[in-house]
Image: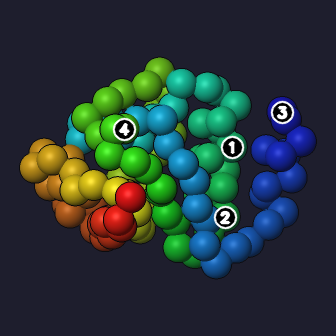
Amino acid sequence: MPPATSSAPSFQVRHAIISIGALHADFGPSDSVLAEAEFARMVLSRGENRIILSDRSKFGRTALIKVCDFTDIDRLISDGIPDEKLSAALQTAGVSVNVVAP
């Protein structure tokens, strides 16, 4: 286990913020690098407010490794509005979406 992943369980943070490789309405948040997916999963588990930062190019895409379910995050911050299907999945899971200017 990489040092960052092995030490993460000893932390408790207010805001757990991760980036992600892909966001798909059916598959959820995913990444293509196993170590990054495992670290992201661990970080999210240690935060009170679990946040994904993602640019809109990740919407509708899948990557090899599922990081978590949408119910495991509280907020998505992006530079674009998710499509209708992704928006519905996020809303069903109770995820708030914040769109910021690029």
Number of the label disc, if any, that sits on residue 68: none
Considering only order in the chain, which callout, 2 or 1, is on the residue closer to the N terminus? 1
Q: Amino acid at mark 4?
A: Lys
Look at the image and tell me whether residue 89 can be seen.
Answer: no
Q: Is residue 38 left or right of residue 5?
A: left
Q: Secondary structure at mark 3?
A: loop
Please give the residue where the numbered disc 2 appears in the rendered image: 46
Q: Position of residue 33 (x, y in %)?
A: 61, 26
Q: Secondary structure at mark 1?
A: helix
Q: Is residue 41 left or right of residue 24?
A: right
Q: Nearer the viewer, mark 3 or mark 1?
A: 1
Considering only order in the chain, which callout, 1 or 4, is on the residue closer to the N terminus? 1
Q: CA distance from mark 2 to mark 3?
A: 17 Å
Q: Nearer the viewer, mark 4 or mark 3?
A: 4
Q: CA distance from mark 3 to mark 1?
A: 10 Å
Number of the label disc, if any, that sits on residue 39: 1
In percent of the image, x 84 and y 33: which residue is there?
Answer: 1
Q: CA distance from mark 2 to mark 4?
A: 24 Å
Q: Amino acid at mark 3?
A: Met
Please give the residue where the numbered disc 4 appears in the rendered image: 58
Q: Secondary structure at mark 4?
A: helix
Q: Secondary structure at mark 2?
A: loop
Q: Position of residue 100 (x, y in %)?
A: 36, 67
Considering only order in the chain, which callout, 3 or 4, is on the residue closer to the N terminus? 3
Looking at this rendering, what residue extends furthest in the front direction?
Answer: 102
Please give the residue where the numbered disc 3 appears in the rendered image: 1
Mark 1 and mark 2 in contact? Answer it, CB < 8 Å: no
